[in-house]
Amino acid sequence: MGMKPARFDHLLPSTLQEALSMLAEHAPDARPLAGGQSLVPMMNFRLARPTVLVDLNKIPELAYIRDAGDHLAIGAMTRERAIENSDLVRAASPLLHDATLNIAHLPIRSRGTIGGSISNADPAAEYPATVLALDATLVARSVRGAREILAAAFFDGVMTTTLEPDEILAEIRVPKAPPGSGGAFVEIARRHGDFALAGVAAQINLDGEAVTDIRLAACGVGPGPIRLTAAEDILRAGGLTDAALAEAGRAAAEAADPEGDVHATAAYRRKLAGVMTRRAVKKAAGRARKTV
Amino acid sequence: MTDTRKITVTVNGERLTGAAEPRMLLVDFLRDELRRTGTHVGCEHGVCGACTVIIDGDAARSCLMFAVQADGAEISTIEGLAANGEMHPLQKLFSEHHALQCGFCTPGMLMTAMDLVHNSKDHSPEAIRTGMSAALCRCTGYVGIIEAVTEYARQVHGDAAVADRDSGENSHG
């Protein structure tokens, strides 16, 4: 009757310091429990069997969205629903707002957290690709201190990150989108809220129609989020012409490294990587033109 | 040795206490320990939405939370919708629009809709369809469900709130 996950001990710290001490004491058997929207299903299937859960849900100091001048500082335990409803996020990072609306469904976003999603590093998840495209800085904390990790150095293969077993992701620093910039997240799923077959996060800066800066990252089409540097180079050199967009789409498809599964073949996902790239760039550029 | 904790929650305004191992899911605690069986349990991994309840104001999957995490929480379930022997307006609309057949998904549908209509700002047809995609029905199809929720949003927020704003730009014909 109703006992699916394997047995574990539940620890409920009320401060970050307390949580870090618990993790240090129980590493590597302990896992932090954030929103639980990915970890708990895996525990219900017994694909994950942590013996100790350090539950971060009662640590108020980990849930915040702050204006920190040139960037937004977002606490790791901030719920996706709070990010979706934040006027500050909508104004300072349309890409982050867009990406959030694509995450699962509202009842999942009620619990799911930004720190949990990034640390879980699911290849199909929206936030890992988004923080790559945003060039965000991720702040890890442990009893040994704090460490700043660039998003580009954080992801390390399927559901793997460069966090140490005693570290947690504590804060996400999202650079504010400057005037003349636009961001967008576009994905394709069988049903809204399902895992993306392919998705692309785009952050673009325009000077007139010239592309002065662009960062693109894809999800769902590789072992982790993929930065689409070849496509970026093509658009930086060629601008937003139809020819350059088509070429960038082909480069993105080439950079994709998808596996086929019951939802879509590898070839279809690869094609989608190109299509999503073109759509995301167009949407981001449209927004950039409006902010000038 | 079993590690059992005492858990107190407020369910539909009623303070209830039960015992749970850390690994007991909230939905099983509600059903098996507190005997509040109105909330259904389907897929147990957050996909189907049958177990959706409202926890401290927001709809959430009760199969993706442990009972120990809900200690002290305020929970609303389908059992709290009807009052004085009268169905809630949303329940009446589900009946009128034939928005259920077997009824298995209905508790989750209703709690998803309550959150969507009362806590979201956007009640356009697109937003209601997207919002209700959080819960799966395997017998009626969704036409009646969407009609019932749209009519409820109209009752709560007025005609303008449920009007189609996109005039076809995003329609898929």
Image: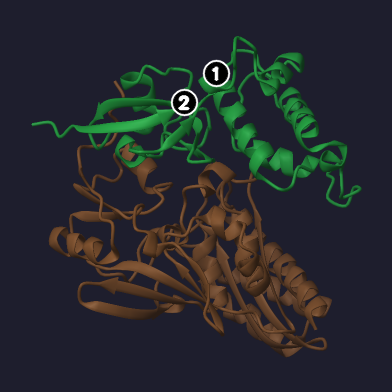
Chain colours: A brown, B green
Q: Is residue A131 visible?
A: yes
Question: Residue A44 occupies which quadrant of the picture?
Answer: top left
The residue shown at (61%, 57%) is A84
Are the residues tagged 2 and 1 within 8 Å (C-beta)? yes
Q: Is the residue A239 above or below the residue B72 in the image?
A: below
Q: Is the residue B11 above or below the residue A274 in the image?
A: above
Q: Nearer the viewer, residue A229 or A173?
A: A173
Farthest residue, direction right = B167
Question: Residue B82 occupies which quadrant of the picture?
Answer: top right
How packed mark 2 is, by other alpha carbons closer than 10 Å (few <14, some 14-19, many 20 or more), is: some
**Quadrant into which the N terminus of chain B falls:** top left
Residue A88: x and y in percent read 62, 69
Q: Nearer the viewer, residue A92 or A213?
A: A92
**Residue type beneath disc 2:** Gly
Task: Tell me if A246 is positioned left or right of A98 in this view.
Answer: right
Task: Tell me if A28 is positioned left or right of A71 in this view.
Answer: left
Q: Is residue A261 visible?
A: no
Q: Which residue bears the numbered disc 1?
A: B104
Residue A47: x and y in percent read 31, 43
Task: Tell me if A147 is positioned left or right of A50 in this view.
Answer: right
Judged from the image, the secondary structure of the residue bearing numbered disc 2 is loop
Farthest residue, direction left = B1
C-alpha distance separating marks 2 and 1:
9 Å
The residue shown at (73%, 20%) is B93
Q: Which residue bears the numbered disc 2?
A: B42
Q: Nearer the viewer, residue B45 or A108?
A: A108
Question: Residue A63 occupies which quadrant of the picture?
Answer: bottom left
Judged from the image, the secondary structure of the residue bearing numbered disc 1 is loop
The residue shown at (43%, 46%) is A37
**Residue type beneath disc 1:** Phe
